[in-house]
């Protein structure tokens, strides 16, 4: 018998997770498997065969329906066989059992991120390091440095530095970009929108006449009609060229970078995630890691889908996804759940689609008082897409940020639901940052899930509150209302760039996200944003575990620590049910287990 101890202070009394009151009566009850559910039975059970692994003298947070907390757990052949008291679990200890003494430490189900872009994130700094940017000066300094490396006439591009996260709360101007790089076309892209310099406009033929013909894409100076350099949905009008000095990685090098990123996910307790808008090449990369035994995060894929164009071609693509073995018979580590499209723009860029006008804004460069944002799919096409996915059993989701985009997607779900039940497909609303009470109620009624990024509240509230005002911000990430209504809401990061849980663009540190859901605090913002929408500690944990397992179509296998489920769990250095609020974000993971096996998480 191998015996390990996770060092800690005295073993704390078991407390009720909500009231904090002693739960003495639970100490003499055994949690065991009956029909796949945890039930309570007397201690007098027959001797059990030895398990591979036993963890004892800790606080095992089951995240079952009753959200029970127990001292010990037994694992055999990668699955949980029992949860109970130390005395009850002792029967599973044999001569070859690996025994871990938790010394009071907390064990949680493996954490799940509902929204990542791991492949592209792993490649973001493959060519060169990109510093953090908190101001326009930081942006311009980076561009000036790149002019020393990139040959004249070649493009300098910078993506996903959001203006909401810059102290000046605005785009760099065309003149500023011209001064920083007078001999290079420059694109500063943030989400679907971009600020560009004069050479970039010139190379793409974006002049006064072009702007007049594309008023939805090209912002102009109202006094001259000349393009300002701000482009909405820039990908439809702007073409860039790769730099000749950009490093070209081999397939093996790209795979190594992705594997390293997934290991960092493990370091922060993440054992499963959903890749939203995964491409063919992205799926192939995950398949290679799976074949090599290096896929250390359970990945489920929302395949990217262009919603426009010939619908027969779209249906053929959906047929291909629905026939893929990763959909029909997914691997425990890799599978397809459905597709993702883009319904509106972004709140970080000034193009999310709202029911009320954005309002004139120097922050976002908006001078039209009636502007409500950008919507990319009309009602009939949206309902047709949802129906085509539901017919094939594919989960549908759409990037939907503004309240009007969210309402339009839920309308489409409701229309299709009259013919085909939507809930079994596990279709969702991606982001759903601004969500009305009506949309919340309808999502609950339809069984539609929501994929939300709480770190955006931390990073972007200052700018959003300045733009929209406190009353309108009542609809921003209404987490408590979602839980109260029974909507399956799951926490994610939308991790897009960099390896590093806090240095990444859209940080993927789940404990930062948990802290935000409980405190509703934001960077550079005084007070708490509508604290009545904060989650309880129990809800906070469900948000990153069982709810996301539901979004992954995997709640029967992961997301909670119940007999029969896969033994994905983490050991953390503090009690997340009782520690002070401000200690949540500093949580460290001491060990991460996948299928009952510890993963390497050393720095």
Image (spheres, grey):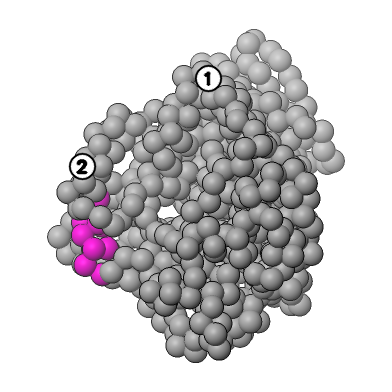
- Quadrant position of the N terminus in the picture: top right
Indicate the secondary structure of the residue bearing disc 1: loop
Instruction: Pick whichever of labels 1 and 2 is earlier in the sequence.
Output: 1
Percent from the top left, x then y, of residue 278? 43, 42
Viewer-closest of 300 and 44: 300
Q: Residue 544: tell me if it is visible.
A: no
Taking the spot 34% from the left edge, 49% from the top edge, the residue there is: 305
Residue under label 2, please give it: 316
Q: How many neighbours does mark 2 have within 10 angstroms: few (below 14), some (14-19), or many (20 or more)? A: few
Query: Relative to residue 106, is residue 201 drawn left or right?
Result: left
Query: Relative to residue 264, is residue 410 drawn left or right?
Result: left
How far apart, in angstroms, are the residues tagged by discs 1 and 2?
32 Å
Percent from the top left, x then y, of residue 404? 39, 75
Q: Are marks 1 and 2 in contact (CB under 8 Å)?
A: no
The image's mark for residue 293 is: 1
Taking the spot 84% from the left edge, 41% from the top edge, the residue there is: 9
Q: How many neighbours does mark 1 have within 10 angstroms: few (below 14), some (14-19), or many (20 or more)? A: few
Percent from the top left, x then y, of residue 279? 41, 40
- Quadrant position of the C terminus in the picture: top right
Q: Which residues are magenta?
A: 379-389
């Amino acid at each position: 018998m191998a015996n390990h101890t996770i060092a800690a202070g005295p073993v704390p009394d078991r407390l009720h997770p909500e009231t904090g009151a002693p739960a003495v009566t639970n100490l003499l009850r055994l949690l065991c498997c009956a029909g796949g559910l945890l039930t309570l039975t007397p201690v007098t059970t027959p001797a059990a065969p030895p398990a591979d692994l036993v963890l004892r003298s800790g606080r095992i947070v089951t995240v079952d329906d009753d959200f029970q907390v127990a001292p010990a757990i037994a694992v055999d052949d990668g699955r949980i066989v029992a949860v109970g008291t130390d005395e009850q679990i002792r029967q599973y200890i044999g001569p070859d059992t690996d025994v871990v003494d938790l010394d009071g430490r907390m064990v949680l189900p493996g954490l799940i991120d509902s929204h990542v872009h791991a492949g592209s994130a792993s490649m973001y700094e493959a060519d060169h390091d990109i510093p953090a940017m908190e101001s326009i000066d930081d942006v311009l300094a980076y561009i000036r440095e790149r002019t020393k490396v990139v040959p004249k006439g070649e493009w300098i591009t910078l993506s996903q530095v959001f203006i909401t996260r810059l102290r000046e709360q605005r785009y760099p101007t065309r003149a500023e970009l011209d001064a920083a790089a007078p001999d290079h076309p420059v694109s500063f892209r943030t989400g679907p929108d971009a600020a560009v310099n004069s050479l970039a406009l010139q190379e793409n033929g974006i002049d006064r006449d072009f702007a007049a013909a594309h008023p939805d894409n090209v912002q102009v100076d109202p006094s001259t009609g000349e393009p300002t350099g701000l482009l909405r949905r820039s990908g439809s009008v702007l073409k860039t060229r790769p730099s000749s000095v950009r490093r070209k990685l081999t397939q093996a090098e790209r795979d190594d970078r992705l594997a390293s990123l997934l290991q960092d996910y493990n370091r922060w307790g993440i054992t499963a995630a959903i890749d939203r808008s995964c491409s063919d090449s992205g799926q192939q990369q995950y398949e290679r890691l799976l074949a090599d035994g290096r896929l250390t995060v359970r990945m489920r894929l929302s395949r990217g889908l262009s919603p426009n164009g010939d619908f027969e071609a779209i249906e053929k693509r959906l047929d291909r996804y629905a026939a893929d073995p990763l959909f029909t018979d997914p691997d425990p580590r890799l599978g397809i759940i459905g597709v993702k499209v883009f319904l509106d723009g972004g709140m970080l860029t000034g193009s999310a689609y709202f029911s009320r006008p954005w309002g004139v804004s120097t922050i976002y460069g908006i001078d039209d008082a009636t502007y409500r944002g950008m919507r990319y799919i009309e009602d009939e096409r949206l309902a047709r897409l949802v129906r085509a996915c539901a017919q094939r059993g594919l989960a549908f989701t759409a990037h939907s940020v503004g309240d009007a985009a969210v309402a339009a997607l839920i309308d489409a779900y409701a229309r299709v639901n009259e013919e085909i039940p939507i809930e079994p497909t596990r279709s969702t609303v991606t982001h759903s940052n601004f969500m009305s009470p009506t949309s919340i109620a309808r999502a609950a009624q339809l069984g539609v899930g929501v994929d939300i990024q709480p770190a955006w509240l931390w990073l972007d509230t200052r700018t959003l509150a300045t733009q929209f005002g406190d009353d309108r911000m009542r609809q921003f990430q209404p987490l408590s209302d979602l839980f109260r209504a029974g909507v399956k809401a799951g926490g994610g990061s939308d991790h897009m760039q960099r390896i590093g849980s806090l240095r990444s663009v859209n940080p993927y540190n789940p404990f930062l996200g948990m802290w935000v859901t409980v405190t509703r605090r934001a960077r550079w913002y005084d007070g708490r944003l509508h604290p009545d929408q904060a989650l309880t500690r129990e809800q906070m944990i469900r948000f990153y575990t069982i709810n996301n397992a539901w979004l992954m179509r995997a709640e029967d296998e992961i997301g909670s620590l119940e007999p029969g489920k896969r033994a994905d769990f983490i050991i953390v250095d503090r009690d997340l049910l009782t520690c002070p609020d401000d200690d949540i974000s500093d949580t460290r993971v001491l060990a991460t287990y996948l299928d009952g096996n510890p993963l390497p998480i050393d720095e």
